[in-house]
Amino acid sequence: MYVRHASEIWRDFPELVPGVLSAGGIATEVRGEAVDAVVAEHERAALARLAVSPEGELAEVRAWRRAFARMGLKPTQYRCAAESLLRRLRKEGALPRIHPLIDVCNALSVAYAIPVAVFDVSAVADGLEVRYASGQETYLTFSGETEHPAPGEVVFADGAGRAHARRWTNRQSGLSAVRDATSEVLVVAEALHESAPADVGKLLAALAGVLGDLWGGRPAHTVLTASAPRFDR
């Protein structure tokens, strides 16, 4: 299982900083109050930032808006996952609870304003490549419908030609979504802002710490670069 970004992505977005983490033992039950404490801590950090600046003015979000504009997408119509979560947090005061690991990753995403994607590796063939779509890929929505990404759209594609995310950090597939039976995951966090190298590293370290504390795992993680663009687990 691997994660890599195509050379064309590095060429067009040289400021990209992707971080990848691999973890097992996710099906192990954890104490709900421990998860709630972690989530609340990071939600408070995000709300403190939002009290000073709305999500659209954060440097992390502005960088993704510029990238979306370069891809021909309207930034306020197609928002990166972190911006969507921050927007919901600002309006509702808390994020919805979905699954303990997803709840933690969403909380870290808003705290750092960085999109975080979590994939169940049992549904991924060979590995994931972030690349421009050919238009032949299949994408399964959460409602069970099959779509085909437009040619040139940035997708997370596996070896079977299935897209596990559309519009880069905008929309994940239902095919590899984390569920109660999920035991092993790949987590991908990506950023484009100036301090991204430090921030992505901090986010991964924080997530690895939570996984060790709550799930008892020893996740492997790294920050990718154009010269070292591939993670293998």
Image: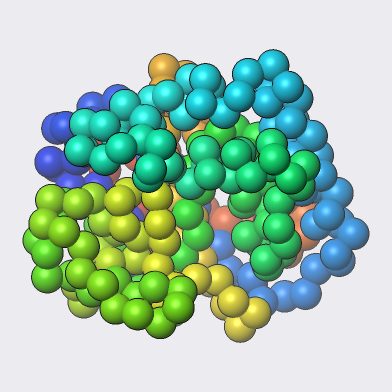
| Residue lying at 26% horizontally and 32% vertically, measured from the top left | 69
| Quadrant in the picture for residue 127 | bottom left
| Residue lying at 40% horizontally and 36% vertically, measured from the top left | 76
Q: Is residue 91 above or below residue 147?
A: above
| Quadrant in the picture for residue 138 | bottom left
Look at the image and tell me in which quarter the C terminus lies: bottom left
Viewer-closest of 67 and 34: 67
| Residue lying at 40% horizontally and 82% vertically, measured from the top left | 144
| Residue lying at 26% horizontally and 56% vertically, measured from the top left | 155
Viewer-closest of 187 and 133: 133
Is any atom of residue 124 visible in this view? yes
Q: Is residue 149 above or below residue 79?
A: below
Q: How many marks?
A: 0
31 on left or right of 144: right
- Image location of residue 52, percent across then percent down: 69, 16
- Image location of residue 153, percent across then percent down: 19, 51
| Quadrant in the picture for residue 103 | bottom right
Look at the image and tell me in which quarter the N terminus lies: bottom left
1 on left or right of 70: right
- Image location of residue 2, percent across then percent down: 32, 61
Is any atom of residue 232 visible in this view? no
